[in-house]
Image: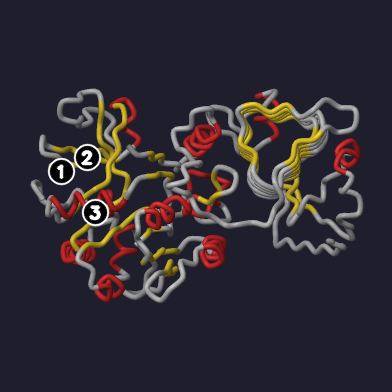
Amino acid sequence: MIMAGGKGSRLGPLTSHRAKPSVPFAGRYRIIDFVLSNFVNSGYRRLYVLTQYMASSLIKHLNRNWHLGGVSQYVEVVPAQMRMGEHWYRGTADSIYQNLNLIRDSRAVNFAVFGGDHIYKFAIDQMEEAHIELDADLTVAAFPVPKSEAHHFGVIQIDEAGRIVGFQEKPRENAQTIPGRPEWCLVSMGNYFFKTDTLIDVLIEDANDPHSAHDFGKNVIPGEPKGAAPYWRDVGTIESYFQANMEVRSRLPAINLYNRQWRIRTAQRDYPPARFVRAGDEPSADIDDSLVCEGSIVASAMLRRVVLGYDSYVHSRAEVEDSVILSGCNIGARARLRRVLLDKNCSIAPGAEIGVDPEADRRRFPFITESGIVVLPKGTHVPASGPLEIVHDMDFLMRNDPATQQALGAFDGLYTISKRERHSFESSGPRYTKYSGNKP
């Protein structure tokens, strides 16, 4: 079972209209693709994905792109159903408890319970082998982090034999370290292997505890009696999500997306290859340490340390550095972007600047992290000056750079706009936009 109902409130505008597991990552994937790929690559073919918060885009992605084929092979979406009373999922443990019928019906000896909102790669079958070899009631996947970073995570205390003897929830001081490694701590990845009987017992016990928050990390795992190389990143904040994307595009990425033996699966889109062109008499595109996804076009622009999502456009003389651009974005000619995170379908007007003047940014943009990352919600249009606007279903209607059109020779006539409505951040109420055009 994969827990994918989380709200991800610390991701701000990225999760204002989608569940955290549905947030795009590395240009072409969604976060949920990583845990599903780990299971499939490890040989597991019966997967339940538990959903709740704003699950529409997540369910659509799973239904359209994750068909394993066969009666006994499936990725099955399980929405919250109030099976155990008049309440939705109250926590990670409660989401599993409310689906005890599926656990019992499976007749499995061991059961995996994993989170669907982290980025990681590891062989899950090896974890189960160790779980069986040690005859453990519960095995917890853990990751070593420096002691100085332990206060961000749930820390596991182990003895010399690797047995869990304690648990600390985000300790601000005196974090328990790994035996023999005083500067390192083990933190829980939120992924567990249970003996099925043990899982059922602890879930029922937790459900009957009126003081429990019904959370695996806070209640179920710490409540177990004492004695009872991989890649992993918690992308629960804008800062950590941004940094994980930067790691993917680096020269020696910590997570290798090009390993043919361990593919990360996702939607297969019918976009052409990425293209880098010279716009008119402008110099060629200048790209360094960047990841550019399919269907995107960079015309006489500069990219430095950028993740550029699929079906996006960067026009002539634009400069983009240290930024994450999700799919469907349009960067106008001579625009300048530094440390920017654009959600899908954003449009930057020609000559606009973001990240160049921190003081001006703080006056203009509502979402800026402490380190200065400017975050633009889905569908934002940034004019060269004036208030920001939201353009719904923009679909690249802002492709108006004559030099780029001349270079591509295919922009003219692709789309005819009959109507486009916008609203500013200050407006309120329902918003509807209709377009008609002649898409060839």
Q: CA distance from mark 3 to mark 2?
A: 19 Å
Taking depth in this image into account, of 349 and 252 the one nearest to the observer is 252
**Percent coordinates x, y for residue 246 in the rendering:** 54, 32
- Label 2 Cα crowd, 10 Å radius (few <14 / some 14-19 / many 20+): many
Q: Quadrant of the N terminus?
A: bottom left
Name which of mark 3 and mark 2 comes first in the sequence: 3
- Dividing the picture into quadrants, the one containing residue 210 is bottom left
Judged left or right of residue 348, residue 72 is left
Going by the numbered disc 1, the residue's amino acid type is: Ile
Say whether marks 3 and 1 touch (CB < 8 Å).
no
Q: Position of residue 87 (x, y in %)?
A: 37, 70
Residue at the image position 82 percent from the left and 62 percent from the top: 435
Query: How far apart, in angstroms, are the residues tagged by discs 2 and 1?
Result: 7 Å
Task: Please state which amino acid type lies under the numbered disc 2.
Answer: Ile
**Nearer mark to the viewer, of 3 and 1:** 3
Quadrant of the image occupied by residue 205: bottom left
Q: Is residue 294 left or right of residue 414?
A: left
Tell me which label, 2 or 1, sits earlier in the chain. 2
Judging by the rendered image, the residue that carries numbered circle 3 is: 128
Badge 3: few (under 14), some or many (20 or more) residues near its Cα, within 10 Å?
some
Dividing the image into 4 quarters, which one contains the C terminus? bottom right
Circle 3/circle 2 CB separation < 8 Å: no
Do the numbered discs 2 and 1 sit on residues whose CB atoms are within 8 Å? yes
Residue indicated by mark 1: 164
**Res 156 label:** 2
Residue at (41, 63) in percent of width and height: 49
Residue neighbourhood size for the residue with mark 1, other residues' Cα within 10 Å, grouped as few (<14), some (14–19), many (≥20): many
Q: Mark 3 or mark 1: name the one nearer the start of the chain.
A: 3
